[in-house]
Image (cartoon, rainbow, N blue to C red):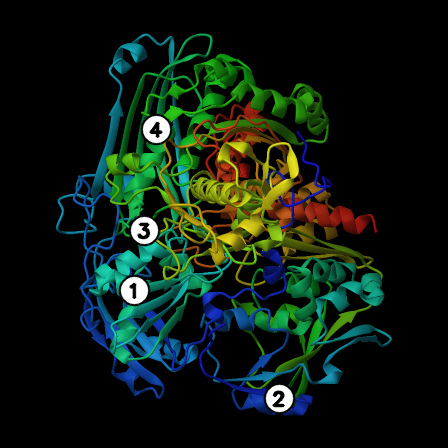
Amino acid sequence: MIPSTLEYTKASSIDEAVAAVAAGAVPLSGGQSLMPMMRLRLAAPHAIVDLSGIPELVGICEDEDEIAVGAMTIHREVAASQLIREHAGLVADAAGGIGSPQVRNRGTIGGSLGHADPHSDMPATLIAAGASVIAKGPNGERRILVEDLITTYLTTTLEPGEIITQVRIPKSDDHSAYAKFHRRAIDWTVVGVGVCIGDDGVRAAATGVADKPVRLTAFEAVLNGGGSLDDAIAKVAEGIEPHAGLDGSAEYKKHLLGVLARKAHAEASSR
Amino acid sequence: MAVDYTTQATGGIGDAVLRKEDRKFVTGEGRYVDDLKLPGMLHAAFVRSPFGHARITSIDASAALALPGVHAVLTNESLPVETGVLSASNPGGDVRHPEQAILAKEIARYVGEPVAMVIADDRYLARDGADLVHVEYDPLPVVVDAEKALEDGAPLVHAEYDSNLVKTLEHVTDGFDDAMAKAAKVIKLRVDNQRLTPSAMETRGCIGDWQEATGEVTLYTSTQVAHFVRTFVSIVCGTSEAKVRVVTPDVGGGFGAKLNTYREEFAVCAASHAVGHPVKWIEDRTEAGVATIHGRAQVQYYEVGVTDEGKIVALKFDAVQNNGAYNMLLTPSISHLTLFMVPGLYDIQDISIRIRQAFTNTTPTDAYRGAGRPEATHGIERLMDAIADDLGIDAAEVRRRNFIKPEQFPYSSATGLIYDSGSYDANLDAALELSDYAGFEARRAESEAKGKYRGIGLSTYVEVCGLAPSAVTAALGIGAPGWEHSTVRLHPTGKATVITGTSPHGQGHATSWSQITQTELGIPFEDVEVIHGDTAFQPYGLGTYGSRSLAVGGIALYRSLGKVREKARELAAHLLECSIDDLEWTGTAWQVKGSPDRSKTIQELAYAGWTSASLPEGIEPVLEATTFHDPPNFTFPSGTHVCEVEIDPETGRIEILKYTAVDDCGNVINPLIVDGQVHGGIIQGLGQALFEETVYAEDGQMLTPTFVEYLVPSAADVPEMTLSRTTTPSPSNPLGVKGIGEAGTIGASAAIVNAAVDALSGLGVRHIEMPMQPARIWNVIQEAKS
């Protein structure tokens, strides 16, 4: 990697990291997105602050209502967590299928959300699970629903100086699953769908079909209105116009939405 | 014949001995260009054109030069060398050879063409400097598609010519029209053999070191052809060839992409001359996507005349080859290899071939594993299935009816080759048996019951290898020969140094050459060292490509070993005081026939030859011999590959369930290496069939410069393969070897595509273009159903 000249610091506390980011540094978590962008010089930060030396950003714990996942927790830990498997199985599904073992041992849940790639697996599942993030900035902490976090390609509602410190996933008894499709065995997701089936209805979200992860509102509405799964699948792409690319036409991706929504729904129902 | 790796390996010919060079590679001890650091060395980065076609109106280097650590910014005008046509093939022939300056001169003709060069203290600063060079471009009209480039009114890639036509290859047999007129049926097929990016694990890289005081130039470079590079560096840099040394350290793969002479290789030498320091350049992966040659890129139109029984009576082949923006070392010659192999292994004597080569605003194309032959094989093997489908004849049977038969060898092909040997029915029989072809329909029904489409596909191939008899390269207008060099040198201790003109970059020559030496000269495998790739240590060598190393370089070695053995025999007769006719070779010693107590081992003779205390009349000291071997003919490996796939109609994903390959590469030196070559070759063919495609937008932008867009298969995408062999030794060389480096790639793509077409044949699908990514397959299914 031949990045442009930059300053590197490693923060040992959240406050130190926040101060560095507020001063213009770009936060480096697992490096699975930022580093490739720096390699291509699509990102050329003048400074980066490494978050890997902050112990409180790592780990998974619970309180009465939520699971708290430190932003620097790697995908492998999320995939292996019994707590997440029990209360938000689709998040564990997604974490266990990201990239390769090397990527899952480096990439983090907070980094995936902060990077906001529209093909990432994690954000869609966290949206379906109703998760939030805790963001900390110079003005203190605030909570943001993941659904409100990502606005478009590589863009979030984080304020300047804010970093994601924690992801909070509601503890639920929902049955949930994530289904995705990619071209090679190890590859970017073309389309992925997460489905949660609970007492209060069905929630579903998809990745790869827009400039950000999206709720499948038409699909949810049919099912929550008592309609059949077939009818819901027929409407799954309503209001969604995926971008055609080398990985497929818009029509193909809309078709995959249906295939994957059905698959995720079936898997969730069987759990 | 299944390979038994448990056979006790002693290191002789035919043994599955482990590769002696692998320890350094698997422990990270290999030394590649980027591992080399010379005193005072500076680093280069290139400014490359972001436009497919543009006039360079100004280059402002002031900001780059102001950056501390930047030593120079060079443009074509400021490079201190002669520039000119850098392509080797067809000099003075009927081919258009536009000037390819070292750095773009006035006009850039493809995205990634080098425009300026920044020299700095380190690689990072060089790249920072390159980002600060401000180039003004005036965009010009672009053409990327080769067929469109040949249409009237197409934008001209080189304005000095009246069209984008580089060259037309034509070959029509006398009886073609009559034969085609008599055909019971004519079947047509268009096949697009897509552009590929070679993607060696080690990208290119080089260090130029120009010594002002002596005028000597040393170039360290990741290449397959050190001597070619030396010749061209001397021409381009205006230096005596005797003053240029090219060193090839370990090379991490080439696949033909390093069978070339590149602008960057000249540029680092010239830059070293300009700045008075060694200059290193290492290509980064994204740069490799545009700066290193591409492969394939050939569109083919077939028309085949057949009898009602499926016998081919005449074949017409009309193709357009996309050469890219310039001709590289062998660009105009690649489709010659296609031309040779258009009839494949079928007895087709009436043929009409036309191949038009076109300039386009794209990275130049040249040799990529198989180089022109995969294109021919893929096309004819798709065509054989089209014939089978059209006439309702089994795909294996239609091939069998058209095969050249064993009794027809040596076989004169309609394209002027003499196929040396082969047993195509034997390959087919073995592959059908191993793949349980007969039991396929039951398996198809099983898949159908699960809602999946299952198909089986065949590819029967022959390739022309062992490039090349020098008379043939001359006849093709290539200004270079096809022989190979070897030297065998025995040391006083009885150990051997083998110097070879071949240039291994993954092929395991150190191992195979040691095995041949052990068998032919009795020097133990571990006592043989193999030297290659340094022009200071060897006479001219032609390098490694075209599955030539064993069939040409290995024979050069075999002949040198024989010369040493015979010289040793004269020495032994002298020392044992007998006639040479009284001696017999035991495999490790010369002994008096019937008298084991009267013998001299090769080690004893090496010592005696060195001490020279008592030499026979007319014999010079030292056991050493050199050979320049020019092969009398090509070799013709062949095989049958069978692929079985299952297609998920919901997603369009193709899963390869079974892959069977039966290859005839003649006699085998090391079964492990042969199997490794077949595995790797098949994976590259699979990559083309399922995933890989280098894509240009209409405006000349390259859409697949990284491995995010350009899908190279991973290990997890590779099916288990069942390999087997038949053996018909080549009569063209004393080892009976043929070559195996490209066979897998040549055989694989058609087997996989034929399987997919077969799977969807029930829907009326007759052809699918590559790569067969899921979205394409899903579209094919939707179109077939609608």
Same-subunit check for callouts 4 and 3: yes
Mark closer to the chain start, 1 or 3: 1
Q: Which residue is mark 4?
A: B301
Q: Which residue is mark 2?
A: A18
Mark closer to the chain start, 4 or 3: 4
Same-subunit check for callouts 1 and 3: yes
**Residue in view at x 54 percent, y 72 percent:** A35
Q: Single out the residue that lies furthest toward the front.
A: B577
Instruction: Assess disc 2: are there few (<14), some (14-19) or many (≥20) residues with their C-alpha within 10 Å of its C-alpha.
Output: many
**Front-most of residues B672 and B69:** B672
Q: Which residue is mark 1?
A: B244
* Helix, strand or loop for disc 1: strand
- Please identify, in this view, whether the residue under mark 1 or under mark 3 is nearer the observer: 1
Residues at discs 1 and 2 in contact (Cβ within 8 Å): no
Which chain contains the residue that carries disc 3? B
Determine the CA span between mark 1 and mark 2: 57 Å
Determine the CA span between mark 4 and mark 3: 22 Å
Of the residues shown, which amino acid type is indicated by label 1?
A: Val
